[in-house]
Amino acid sequence: MGHLFPSLELATRLSTRHHLTLTVFLVTSHSSSAENNVVAAAEATGLFTVVELPPADMSDVTDSTVVGRLAITMRRHVPALRSAISALTSRPSALIADIFSTEAFAVADEFHMAKYVFVASNAWFLALTIYAQVLDKQIVGQYVDQKEPLQIPGCEPVRPCDIVDPMLDRTESQYYEYVKMGRAIASSHGVLVNSWDELQGRTLASFKDRSLLGRVMNAPVYSIGPIVRHFGSGKDGSSELFDWLRKQPGKSVIYVSFGSGGTLSFEQMTEMAHGLELSRQRFVWVVRPPTVRSDAMFFTTGDGSEDQSEARYLPEGFLERTSEVGFLVSMWAEQTAVLGSPAVGGFFTHGGWNSSLEGITKGVPMIVWPLYAEQRMNATMLADEMGVAVRPKELPGNAVIGREEIAAMVRKIMAEEDEEGRGIRAKAMELQRSAEKACAQGGSSYENFARVVKLFGRTG
């Protein structure tokens, strides 16, 4: 879901603002009803053609790593993509691939199409991905064992504990797939990144400097963000949840959600529940059954068909004690609509870039609870560099975070009397205005978007 939403929104903007004819090729898992509804909603707009590629046979694949399995999945869909493009009545002039779909570049070359990459994450993540091929030669041993931060020219260093999941173990197949992906991105005709100049100016500038990242990045980088979700799951805003939100005071509710794949351990969920209760703040919490793993994090997906009896895995009496101030949602909620509610004044998030941008564009301060992928980097950036968030003292993957710390973080961003919290809220509003300005006519992202559209068809 983290790549589906922004990809569909990108297609929408290309169609509505620049009147391009588009075909969106999807590799879907159909693992959740929400995903199916999002795809259906996109098709219903009629703004572009959606072609779902037939599933590839993965029965013999033993790789259990996320990136490794994704890479194999995309590789095995290349023949289906080739056939689908051949069947089109009009040959496309450009191919825009998701970062995990660069295997499709071979097909683009066959059909003499320009090759672009859409990076749904931010410029710092892109910098690390591109530079991984250099770090691979420079550093001996595991990255997580390094004593000093990883240096990326023109960018903030990356702490070893913050590196992306594929770099955690250099012996795994997903590490080699990740390095390969970085090389492919650098060889494209251009890269579209979901950020904007005013947010990450230093990092974006480093791609253009031949003495910095420009020495390994051959493709121009266009910051076109923020691109945030437009397509929902097909539900409207008249549900019981939104009725409840309309009755709450302004900026009084913290929204708690760990994305489409974030799952907590039973012990961590217990501490989370007690922490929310101790904070004495109103909350909306998107809950899913806990994992049986002993740590405080996991990645999974679900379709909402599981037994959703929250009483089975929440502390005894929690539902009764918080019935006046809390609202629980099973598995999935319309996040952009919730964050846009006048009642919502804080966002407790896993720090996925889509969610981070949704918080920023709504001017909502955040608690960042990184679980997987590049979220540890995002948490550092949002809390330490941008000043729009707080985060736990320990990484959730390393320890169970206690209820007192959780309650303190909630009060930090929600309580009016907290000076630091007021500063975070003010910074969140400042970045909201920055995002709006970047996307408005004449703004940096608006101009970059127009610039790259003009190039489509000229570089094939």
Image: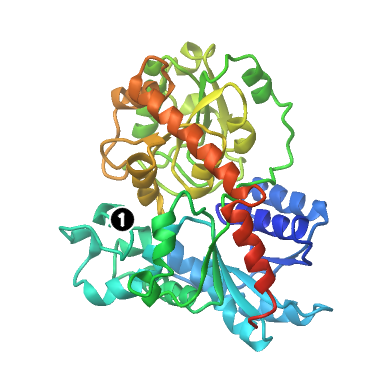
Direction from residue 252 to residue 452 in the image, left or right: right
Residue 248 image point, x, y percent: 59, 15
Find numbered disc 1 in the image and state the secondary structure of the residue it sits on: loop
List x then y, in percent, for residue 22. Answer: 75, 66
Identity of the residue drawn at 15% across and 58% down: 147
**Above or below: residue 298 compared with residue 273:** below
Pick the front one: 280 or 446: 446
Q: Name, please, the residue furthest toward the bottom.
A: 110
Residue 161: give x, y in percent of width and height.
26, 52
Amino acid found under the numbered disc labelled 1: Glu
Q: Dot 1, how many residues are within 10 Å of its Cα: few (below 14), some (14-19), or many (20+)?
A: some
Considering every residue shown, the one lying at the far front of the view is 442
The relative height of residue 25 versus residue 232 in the rendered view (above or below) is below
Visible residue check, residue 215: yes
**Horizontal side of residue 99 vs 458, given as left or right:** left
Residue 84 drawn above or below residue 34 = below
* Colour scheme employed for the rendering of this structure: rainbow
Specify the quadrant that holds the C terminus.
Answer: bottom right
Q: Which of 160 and 208 lies nearest the eye of the viewer? A: 208
Residue 28 visible in the picture: no
| Residue denoted by label 1 | 156
* Residue 425 placement: quadrant: top left
Q: Residue at x 76, y 49 (%)?
A: 41
Q: Quadrant of residue 116?
A: bottom right
Where is residue 93 shown, x and y percent of the image? 72, 78
Instruction: Looking at the picture, tell me which residue is in the foreground, 220 or 251.
Output: 220
Q: Say which residue appears at 28% left-offset and 71% top-offset.
A: 135
